[in-house]
Amino acid sequence: MSIHEESRGGPGRRRLLRVVLTGTVALGAGLVAGSPRPPDTPVAGGPGRTRPATPASALRELETGNARWRTLHERHPDETRTVRQTLVGGQHPFAVVLGCVDSRVPPELVFDQGLGDLLTVRSAGEVLDEAVLGSIAYGVLELGIPLIVVLGHQSCGAVAAAVRADEGGPILPGHMQYLVEQIHPAIDHTLRGAARIDAAITANVRLVRTRLAAEPELAAKVAAGALAVVAARYELTSQRVRRLG
C-alpha cells in the first residue's frame, strides 16, 4: 500500500496542499530564499564550516555532529548573532529529520546542529499523515534539501502503546488510536515482551523510510541522485545514532 493510499484525503486535497505550499513560497520573504543553493557553500558564523549540498556530505555532517554529542564535545554551531541576522533573509537547511515527539530526542541536539541547519518534522512514532508528508515535501521540493533521515529511538512510547493495544489493551482515546493503526504493521508477533517492542521500533522506522522513498516526487529525486532517504535509530543509553540497513 502506498503512502497516498494510507493518507487521509484524496488527490484533490493533495493538489490543494501543493498549491498552498507554492503560494506560501511566493509570498513569504524567508521562504523565497529556499531556491537551489550552490554546492557546499560556507556557513555564516561558522569558521571553515560548509553547508552540505549532497546526500553523502549531509549524512557525514550528521554523523560527525552525533559523535560530538555522544562524547560531550558539542559545539552548538550556528547560534551567533551573525547567523541569526543572516537567517532573517532566508533558510537553507541541509537535512530533513522526521523524528518522534519524544522530548529526549531533539534532532538539533542529537546531531549537534544549530539555527537554519535542519528542517525538523516530528510526530509520535514518526507516523505519516498529510501534514507530515507535506512538510517533508516542502523541504525537498522547495528548499532543495538532499537528505531525509527517519529517526526512531529506543524506548519509544508510541510504539510501546501500539504493541500493548495489539495485545488486547484498551483502545487509546481520541486521535491517539490513529497512531496505533499506523504503527501496527511493524509489530512482529513471533516475539514477546520487551523484544517485541524493541523490534517494532526498528521495523517501524524502516517501514516509514520505505513509504517515503516510494512517494513519486521523492522517488524521482532519489533516482536522480539528488536525494537520499535514510532510516536511523537513536539509542538513549549511548546517545548514538546508528543507520539501519
Image (cartoon, rainbow, N blue to C red):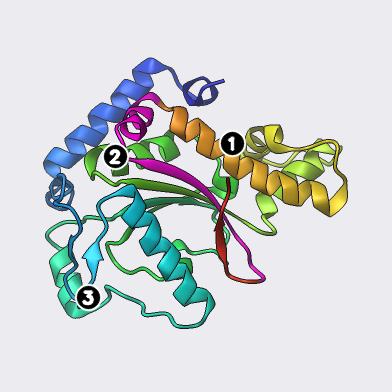
Coordinates of residue 127 in the picture (x, y in percent): 55, 41
Cβ–Cβ under 8 Å for marks 2 and 1: no
Coordinates of residue 230 in the picture (x, y in percent): 47, 46
Say above or below: 51 vs 109: above
Q: Which residue is mark 2?
A: 226
| Lateral position of residue 97 relative to residue 116, left or right | right
Residue at 32 percent of width and 56 percent of height: 57
Name the foreground residue: 31 vs 198: 198
Q: Amino acid at mark 1?
A: Leu
Coordinates of residue 169 in the picture (x, y in percent): 84, 41
Query: Could you give the CA–CA distance between mark 2 and mark 3, rounded to whole angstroms?
Result: 25 Å
Q: Which residues are magenta?
A: 216-237
Dot label at residue 237: none
Q: Is residue 236 magenta?
A: yes
Q: Which residue is mark 1?
A: 207
Q: Amino acid at mark 3?
A: Gly
Residue at 38 percent of width and 29 percent of height: 219
Q: Quadrant of residue 173?
A: top right
Residue at 23 percent of width and 79 percent of height: 80
Q: Quadrant of residue 205?
A: top right
Name the foreground residue: 76 vs 160: 76
Dot label at residue 46: 3
Query: Could you give the CA–CA distance between mark 2 and mark 1, rounded to whole angstroms?
Result: 22 Å
In the current view of this chain or complex, which residue is farthest to the bottom?
A: 73
Label 2 element class: loop
Q: Is residue 9 magenta?
A: no
Cβ–Cβ under 8 Å for marks 2 and 3: no
Q: Residues within 10 Å of mark 3 (few under 14, many from 20)?
A: some
State which quarter of the image contains the C terminus: top right
In the current view of this chain or complex, which residue is farthest to the top?
A: 11
Sooner in the amino-acid sequence: mark 3 or mark 1? 3
Q: Residues within 10 Å of mark 2 (few under 14, many from 20)?
A: some
